[in-house]
Amino acid sequence: MNIALLGFGTIGTGVYELINLNKGRFADNLDEPVAITKILDKDPYKKVDPSDKVCQIVTDPALIMDDPDIKIVISLLGGMDFEYKMIKMSLEHGKHVVTASKAVISEYFQELIGIAKEKNVILRYEAAVGGGIPIIASLKEELKINRINEIKGILNGTTNFILSNMTEKGADFGETLKLAQSIGFAEADPTADIGGYDVSRKLAILSTLAYGGVIRDEDIKKRGLSDVSAIDIEMAGDMGYIVKYLGDSRLVDGHKVYTTVEPVLFPKESLMSNVNSEFNIISIKGDIIGELQFYGKGAGKDATANAVAGDALYIIKCMEEGTYPTYLPMEKELEKCGNAGFKGHYYLRVNLSDDLQKDNDELKYIMDIMDQVKGRSHIIISGKSLFFVTGVVQADEFDALIEKIKKQTDDLFYARIYD
């Protein structure tokens, strides 16, 4: 059984070690030898392990696509356009595919599944969500009996590391982001993580599977994390809360989908509050089973490589037994309703400008806006900062109030409280 590997970066190296260098117990589950025989990489001088006599580096995708002995393609290229092209081409050539690309799967889910069905091959993507957490397989199992009506979780290791470090050390966002970059927890361009796109893509994949209709990244209401400051972490802690970055989707009345990616406050004693660093947690709610929670490393070489190798092993077993999975339907028409289905108390911090006269104007302007929030329960004025805790308000309505405040100042941070 020959496998091709597209991409020889950190995760690709981990997969190569599991399959070709017998790290772990991958080979113990096989009835016949399996090996990665070709690795696509743009660097023709990159080398495989000296002990490996079966694998070669290639730079031309055609050497993989046109090789009839290669039955499985593992795509770990990163990015969007080229990886999408390679995954699609592999499926069209009748090859089974494993990928960890949340970007490609969330954007082209329905199309790629359609090609896999047409060509009678398997597309697996467990590592696209939750790294080493087997959430895709678990969700599919629960859907055999349950109607899933909510999925939420801490789905990004970078932002969770940043918030955990800020909470533990009282550090500010900027310096903690630099720390995360210096130790490899954050990319040089961290936009996908701190802007919510990584979480949104993962949530889109899970929601599409759970609700039976296509949810894309652009359907999900998201708000970035970069406005959080050390004082917000401190104030939340004084109130008994921890700041976390959450993805949440809910199915209401069988067809309305509400989605959000945003910073939230959880009580300190909650399970979500105690998920730290690169660890993730994913919660699904079914009408029969109730709430199930899945915890583990959401990223990293070994955790992700483990999920990828597990998908490859699944495909190999299907080929040996002549059994192929039934793909979940994605044809339901879903109404995408943004974040209007979420409500709660809100924490808000607003910093006023330096000019005292303008401060007075700003203060009146902001207080007038906040007077529109029914049940406003708490106000603190400390130096140039205003801190509010509101009564219960609907998420989209509070967003609209924030947009009014931003006409005066955008030096603010807010988060919904999960009680």
Image: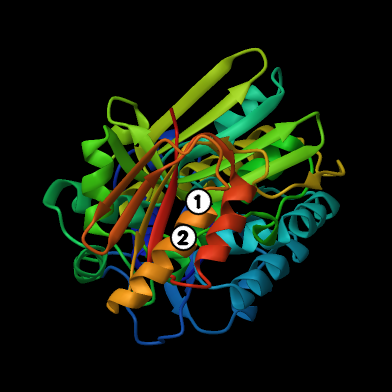
- Which class describes the residues within 10 Å of circle 2: few (<14), some (14-19), or many (20+)? many
Q: Position of residue 123 (x, y in %)?
A: 66, 50
Residue furthest left as drawn: 169
In the depicted view, which residue is nearer to us: 348 or 59? 348
Q: Position of residue 373 (x, y in %)?
A: 55, 44
Separation of marks 1 and 2 at Cα, in angstroms: 6 Å
Residue in view at x 56 percent, y 29 percent: 284
Q: Are marks 1 and 2 in contact (CB under 8 Å)?
A: yes
Q: Quadrant of residue 220?
A: bottom right
**Quarter of the C terminus within the rendering:** top left
Left or right: 155, with 397 as reference point: left
- Of residue 348 and residue 150, the one placed in the foreground of this image is 348
Residue at point 67% right, 28% down? 149
Q: Amino acid at mark 2?
A: Ile
Q: In the picture, residue 81 is in which quadrant?
A: bottom right
Label 2 sits on residue: 366
Q: Is residue 86 left or right of residue 231?
A: right
Q: Position of residue 172 (x, y in %)?
A: 21, 62
**Element marked by disc 1:** helix
Is 344 placed above or below 399 here?
above
Q: Say whether residue 118 is visible.
A: yes
Q: Is residue 170 or residue 184 the one in the foreground?
A: 170
Residue that carries the numbered disc 1 in the rendered image? 370
Residue 212 left/right relative to 26: right
Residue 374, x across and y down, in percent? 56, 38
- Rate crowding at label 1 as few (under 14), some (14 to 19) or many (20 or more) other CA atoms within 10 Å: some
- Going by the numbered disc 1, the residue's amino acid type is Met
Is residue 68 depicted above or below 393 in this figure? Answer: below
State whether residue 224 appears in this view. Answer: no
Element class at badge 2: helix
